[in-house]
Image (cartoon, rainbow, N blue to C red):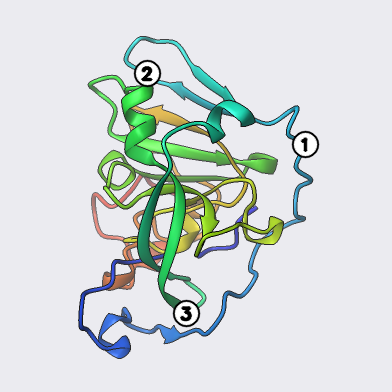
Amino acid sequence: MGQPEGGARREEGASAASELPPGQRLQRGWPVTHYGPVPRFKPERWEFRVFGATADGDKRCWNHEEFSALPFATVVADLHCVTKFSMLGAEWGGVLARTILELAPPAPNVTHVMVWAEYGYSANMRLSDFASEQTIFATHKDGEPLTAEHGFPLRLVVPHLYAWKGPKWVRGVEYMAADRRGFWEERGYHNIGDPWREQRYSYQEEPGDGPEL
């Protein structure tokens, strides 16, 4: 499962210090942070599902070979972990969330998604966050396949939110007509998780930020 982690876009010409959200420190390299064991990848059993409030009421599934054949894109973005380290300017390669939304459209009343990963780990977010042009289901970082410890075969990267909103070892997306807290959100982390507003913990939430705990 994913340890609470997050990310934000770099601005051209900005200094490293100016790119860091409040309370963050610059990290050289990429620490391994997660909760629970690293799952063993079994390609013959792997499946990516989109389900819930889809436009046609049906779920959509891809096996690993099919998912790997989807259009490949790259996004250059930072990663901001709620544990206070920031990694700047990584190149993430994989399948854009917008591609999934096009191939498996949500129903008109969908407002949020739940991203599901191995061991039942989950992370919720607003549909607008998921639909961002930089949100990506990453298979690669800086041109190299992800390692198992960093989420191989698939992790979500949502660059403008703390990285716990981007689970490792993703297996599917649920479309929802109402918000519902995910794994870390039920355990005291902020329902939205904007690093620039330092939305780390649920006690910081304001009315409308999320469902009641």
Q: Nearer the viewer, mark 3 or mark 1?
A: 1
Q: How many marks?
A: 3
Q: Tell me where residue 165 appears, x and y as whole percent.
A: 45, 54
Q: Residues within 10 Å of mark 2 (few under 14, many from 20)?
A: many
In the visual, does 143 lie left or right of 16? right
Three-letter amino acid code at disc 3?
Lys
Q: Residue at x 39, y 53 (%)?
A: 74
Residue with the mark numbered 3: 84
Quarter of the view holding residue 191:
bottom left
Residue drawn where x is 44% and y is 11% of the image = 58
Q: Is residue 127 left or right of residue 69?
A: left
Earlier-in-chain disc, 3 versus 1: 1
| Residue at position x 29%, y 19% in the image | 107
The residue where tag 1 is placed is: 42
Circle 2: element type: loop
Q: Secondary structure at mark 3?
A: loop
Per the rendering, the mark at residue 198 is none
Q: Is residue 191 left or right of residue 49?
A: left
Residue at 25 percent of width and 43 percent of height: 128
Is residue 167 among the parts visible in the rendering?
yes
Do the numbered discs 2 and 1 sit on residues whose CB atoms are within 8 Å?
A: no
**In front: 56, or 189?**
56
Judged from the image, the secondary structure of the residue bearing numbered disc 1 is loop
Q: Amino acid at mark 1?
A: Lys
N-terminal of the pair, mark 2 or mark 1, is: 1
- How far apart marks 3 and 2 lie (CA) works out to 36 Å
Q: Nearer the viewer, mark 2 or mark 1?
A: 1
Whole-number angstrom distance, CA of label 3 to CA of label 1? 33 Å
**Residue 129 point in image, percent of width and height:** 29, 48
* Residue indicated by mark 2: 54
Amino acid type shown at disc 2: Thr
N-term mark: 3 or 2: 2
